[in-house]
Amino acid sequence: MGLKEKLHNIKEKGKGKKWLSAYSAFHTFVYTPNETTHSGGHIKGADDLKRVMTNVIIPLIPILIFGMFNVGFQHNAAINGFPEGMSFFSGDFWNLDNLYIGAVKLIPLILVSYVVGLGIEVFFATINKHEVEEGYFVTGMLVPLIIPIDTPLWMLAVAIVFGVVIGKEVFGGTGMNILNPALTIRAFLFFAYPTWMSGDKVWVAGANALKGTPDAISGETILGGLAQGKDLVYSTWDMFYGFIPGSVGETSTLLILLGALYLLFTKIASWRIMLSAIIGAIVMGLIFNGVVTAGWITEGSKFYDLMTTPYWEHLIIGGFAFGVVFMATDPVTGSQTNKGKWIYGFLIGFISIMIRVFNPAYPEGVMLAILLMNVFAPTIDHYVILGNIKRRLKRLKVQKIIIKNYG
């Protein structure tokens, strides 16, 4: 008996009805739904949740492939030294040895992410007797891209259970959550297992096994080095291309920029949130640069090194670009009004750089900034709408006065 026949028996005859959600999820993943409406007025469109999720995953694929190469490259660079004169097409980077090391490390993380996350989604759909939605397809891809490459698989599984159950299912599932699920999972890992989420040994594959090898690069992220007052060992182009340690998906600003253009072209993401977040980060960076220039903070002070970082450099280091493009623009947890998107994005960028500078123990602030603004997004929209209502009532009052006085 084929899948379609089984689904028909479940719907029509009630056989195995409790498994309807699981059958339906797999059926709609493999086949195009053939149900059509026969009455009423309906808006026709080619987009649905599955297509939206697919259009988010497509720009993540080049970042994923690049990340595999970079994982192997950082591992070998820690042993043999960082090659001079690196370019985006350098043979030292694009070789099968780097790809193999990265694939061996990254593919298990992806498998655990999808198996555990989708398993929970199917479980809750079966219990609640509703269809399995495709919301986790993007989350399942994002999570391995924003965690350290050596994160233990069991630890990732525990975090996913927490993130999906507490961060999404308790609110009603896809479309009802108030926090970005991928960042909720990342936040759980950071606060529950901080030693695995920070330091100079978690960003390079097998770093603990590399003790005693030539210390050509430290293995820590650029933000971690700056927070400790160390000089940069990477050029601007290294940072832009992504030849730096960090989470798998956050290093290549070039590919993230191309991904942003794709999301904007397909109208999946909001350009207002992206642009306002960049403006917010630049404003905060300029303020810090100005404080140093004015002499209010002197060399040797606690926050001096990160404050002297050029404002534009904040855009290409750490997870800022990745977070703004792929997570701040989440249509479920972000602001919905146009004016609210400007406020929401600006505060994400502004707060991200503020946390970077004032929290040396955790110099990457975009995760906390986005989660914080996820909470305030409904409030922002509320006051934007309230302001619009007040302005319209005021105009209406003025018109009534004019009509009364002048007919």
Image: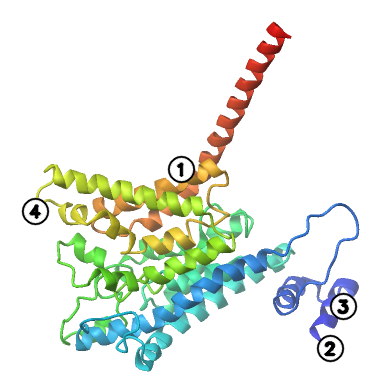
Q: Which three-letter amino acid code belongs to the residue tagged 4?
A: Gly
Q: Tell me which numbered mark, 3 or 4, is placed earlier along the sequence.
A: 3
Inter-mark Cα distance, 3 to 1: 51 Å
In this picture the colour scheme is rainbow
Circle 3 crowding by C-alpha within 10 Å: few under 14, some 14–19, many from 20:
some
Q: Which three-letter amino acid code belongs to the residue tagged 2?
A: Met
Report x, y in % for residue 374. Answer: 49, 50
- Tag 3 secondary structure: helix
Inter-mark Cα distance, 4 to 1: 35 Å
Residue 343's tag is 1
Residue 9's tag is 3
Q: Tell me which numbered mark, 4 or 1, is placed earlier along the sequence.
A: 4
Circle 1 crowding by C-alpha within 10 Å: few under 14, some 14–19, many from 20:
many
Inter-mark Cα distance, 1 to 2: 55 Å
> Which quarter of the picture shows residue 322?
bottom left
Residue 1's tag is 2
Inter-mark Cα distance, 2 to 3: 10 Å
- Rendered view: 396 above or below 344: above
Q: Residue furthest top?
A: 405
Q: Tell me which numbered mark, 3 or 1, is placed earlier along the sequence.
A: 3
Front label number (3 vs 4): 4
Q: Nearer the viewer, residue 323 or 131?
A: 323
